[in-house]
Amino acid sequence: MKNTVMTLLEQKQSGDKITMLTAYDFTTAQIMDECGVNAILVGDSLGMVMLGYENTLPVTMEDMIHHTAAVSRGAKNAFVVADMPFMSYQISVQEAVTNAGRLIKEGGAHAVKLEGGAEVCEQIRAIVNASIPVVAHLGLTPQSVNVFGGFKVQGKSLDKARKIIEDALKIQEAGACAVVLEGIPARLAEIITKKLAIPTIGIGAGNGCDGQVLVIQDMLGMTTGHTPKFVRQFAQVGALMRQGISDYISETKSGAFPAEEHTYSIDENVIKEISEEEN
């Protein structure tokens, strides 16, 4: 079934949890789509997991369009959401609408996602008025990493918890069709989910949200180093890849690969004639 803004809303209303994962390429998106994931996020997290940056800040519109287009070609039923990268919507409302439009027209996304609360409501309204669905993002917003002083849980004090709740209500009023809640206490996310009519998608926000999203490389055990507390590795694909690559190197060097079953045959008479010509 084709996933849309309306089907995601219906899932919230019926209590059917929304599933979302990140993807950045055609093949991964195609596999996710076949598995029946509801939504695919082409996150600016590609800056770290695909391009090797320290954080999401260097990611450009061209990066996002390139990867979004690849994902869109692989996703036939999933709802594709594309992140608006740092400084693609903060400078002006007009620029925000233009860049959102590019992600839809050139990238083939169904919606765009931007970070922030009350301060981006004007952009949300304008983008929605241009007939582009907007997913908001509150809590630990990675593009604000320098303001936060790192990737830290947000909303733990009374004032900050109140601010996130207020922002959630404001972005809903501005026209957002859903909101990602990242890195906030589970009880706070549960309160916000009950207050909002639009779906909440959690990442590090507990199971009281209407759905969940994870970075695919984290979920499949493909990343090394620190693993965030909220990540569950559902498979160890990284280990399988390392074993497969090591086996390939070993068998290629030993001559075991390619074996006869991996090669093409030719008529012996052809080889005989070529051999005689060479002699």
Image (cartoon, rainbow, N blue to C red):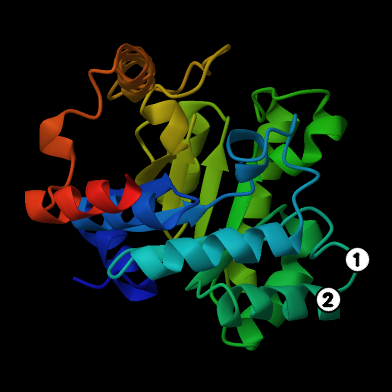
Image quadrant where one finds the C terminus: top left
Q: Position of residue 67 (x, y in %)?
A: 56, 58
Q: Position of residue 133 (x, y in %)?
A: 53, 75
Q: Position of residue 20 (x, y in %)?
A: 37, 49
199 lies left or right of 101: left
85 lies left or right of 29: right
Q: Secondary structure at mark 2?
A: helix
Residue situated furthest bottom in the rendering? 130
Q: Disc number at residue 95?
A: 2
Q: Which residue is at a point 73% across and 56% down the rendered structure image?
A: 85
Q: Which residue is at a point 37% across and 21% down the rendered structure image?
A: 245
Asked if labels 2 and 1 touch by Cβ distance under 8 angstroms, the answer is: yes
Q: Which residue is at a point 49% across and 16% down the rendered structure image?
A: 229
Q: Residues within 10 Å of mark 1 (few under 14, many from 20)?
A: few
- The residue that mark 1 highlights is 91
Q: Position of residue 162 (x, y in %)?
A: 67, 39
Residue situated furthest right in the rendering? 91
